[in-house]
Structures are given as structure tokens and as C-alpha cells.
Image (spheres, rainbow, N blue to C red):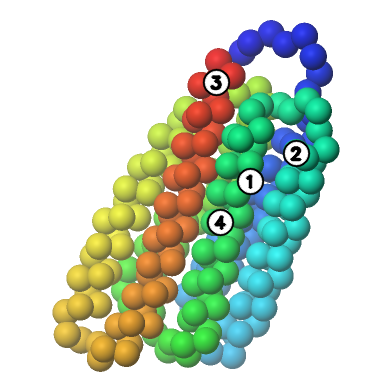
């Protein structure tokens, strides 16, 4: 790591860690959704909405800190991109739960569980990686594994689309289910964006 002559604002690290921990909470709520009946799903949706609002508050806190800090731990653009991508993950997860409730989807297609398992693993890895931004240690395996998980998510998503279009579902149901699986895929993409941003930061700081 480069030797620096000036101190750097350290609270960013804590805020990124808190944001990532909140994403783990969201991924657990997604897992709960799988086995829940319609009444329980409404309650899960309310908890997910609260978590998403907490994520927004965390993102706004990072932006406020960024705008008021003279010295930052790494490039301002990278801080903004990392905070935004973490926020995107939570937004997509909340949207998926909301769609399931609003569309009154009785049964999610086979394969959605795999999507959510991938998101859950990516959330755990991201939460483990954020504290390492302080030292930039042990991050290579993180972004490699998240990229692998995103490739896995792509494969699951394509299989889900093939399943939805095999004639088993009516047209309206296909539209509803496709929106849900597409949003979950966007969440997987957002995890990859976070990992790519972390890699960019690590390369600049090396």
C-alpha cells in the first residue's frame, strides 16, 4: 500500500460495513419469502421496506460525509460508485419482494431459490469484504468469487426464462414472474458492480 503523509477520514469504512450488513439482512428476508404464505409475505415485505429505507439512510450518510470531507480514504468517484452500487442491491431486493406481494404470486418457479441462494452468498462475501477496505488485504478472492457467482446467476436466469416460456404458464403469469426473476438478476449484477469497484479501488491503492 502507498505511504501517505496525510490522515484520512476513517468513518467511511464503518459506513460501508454497515451498508453491507444491511444487505445481509435483506438477503435473509428474501430467503424467508421462499417458504412463506401470502399473509407472511406481506409482513416480510414491510420488514424489507424498512431495511431498504435503512439502506437509503446509510447511502445518504456516506454522500453527506463525502461532501463534507476534505480528505477521503480513496478517490471520491470510487466512494460514490461503491455507495451507489450497494444501494442498488438493496433496491433490487426490495423491489423483488414487493412485486411478489403486489402481483399476489402464489408459487415462485423452480430456480428462484437458486437465484436467492446466490444473492445470499454474495451478500455474505460483500459484508466480509467491506472491513478489509481499511487495509486492502484479502480482497482478491472476494471479487473473483463474486464474479463467479454472477456468472452462475446468469445461467440460472437463462434457465428460468426458458422455463417460463415453455408453455406451462399463461401470458399474464409469465409477465409477472419474469419481472421478479429479472429484478433478482439485476441484484446479482449489482453485486458484481460492487466487486468491480472494490477491485478498482484496490488497484489504485496498491
Q: Give x and y (percent) for residue 50.
A: 71, 70
What residue does disc 1 label? 83
Q: Is residue 178 above or below residue 190?
A: below
| Secondary structure of residue under mark 2 | helix
Which of the two discs, 2 and 3, sits closer to the camera?
Answer: 2
Question: Spatial distance from mark 2 to mark 3, Cα to Cα?
Answer: 19 Å
Q: Give x and y (percent) for residue 11.
A: 80, 36
Q: Is residue 13 above or below residue 35?
A: above
Mark 2 vs mark 4: which is more N-terminal? Answer: 2
Near-viewer residue (152 or 32) = 152
Neighbor class of circle 1 (other Cα within 10 Å; few <14, some 14-19, many 20+) is: many
Mark 1 vs mark 4: which is more N-terminal? Answer: 1
Please identify the quadrant where the N terminus is shown: top right
Mark 2 vs mark 3: which is more N-terminal? Answer: 2
What residue does disc 3 label? 204
Mark 2 vs mark 1: which is more N-terminal? Answer: 2
What residue does disc 4 label? 88
Mark 4 vs mark 3: which is more N-terminal? Answer: 4
Near-viewer residue (172 or 114) = 172
Question: Spatial distance from mark 1 to mark 4, Cα to Cα?
Answer: 9 Å
Q: Residue at x 59, y 42 (%)?
A: 82
- The numbered disc on residue 66 is 2
Residue with the most extreme left position: 166
Q: Are marks 2 and 1 in contact (CB under 8 Å)?
A: yes
Amino acid at each position: 500500500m502507498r505511504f501517505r503523509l496525510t490522515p484520512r477520514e476513517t468513518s467511511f469504512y464503518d459506513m460501508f460495513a454497515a451498508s453491507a450488513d444491511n444487505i445481509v439482512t435483506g438477503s435473509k428476508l428474501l430467503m424467508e419469502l421462499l417458504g412463506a404464505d401470502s399473509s407472511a409475505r406481506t409482513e416480510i415485505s414491510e420488514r424489507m421496506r424498512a431495511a431498504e429505507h435503512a439502506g437509503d439512510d446509510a447511502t445518504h450518510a456516506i454522500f453527506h460525509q463525502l461532501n463534507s470531507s476534505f480528505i477521503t480514504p480513496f478517490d471520491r468517484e470510487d466512494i460514490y460508485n461503491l455507495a451507489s452500487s450497494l444501494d442498488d442491491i438493496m433496491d433490487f431486493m426490495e423491489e423483488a419482494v414487493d412485486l411478489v406481494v403486489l402481483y399476489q404470486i402464489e408459487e415462485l418457479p423452480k430456480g428462484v431459490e437458486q437465484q436467492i441462494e446466490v444473492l445470499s452468498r454474495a451478500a455474505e462475501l460483500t459484508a466480509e469484504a467491506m472491513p478489509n477496505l481499511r487495509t486492502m488485504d484479502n480482497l482478491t478472492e472476494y471479487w473473483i468469487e463474486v464474479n463467479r457467482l454472477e456468472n452462475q446467476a446468469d445461467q440460472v436466469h437463462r434457465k428460468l426464462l426458458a422455463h417460463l416460456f415453455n408453455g406451462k404458464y399463461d401470458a399474464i403469469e409469465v409477465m409477472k414472474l419474469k419481472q421478479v426473476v429479472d429484478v433478482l438478476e439485476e441484484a446479482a449484477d449489482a453485486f458484481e458492480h460492487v466487486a468491480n469497484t472494490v477491485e478498482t479501488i484496490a488497484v489504485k491503492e496498491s
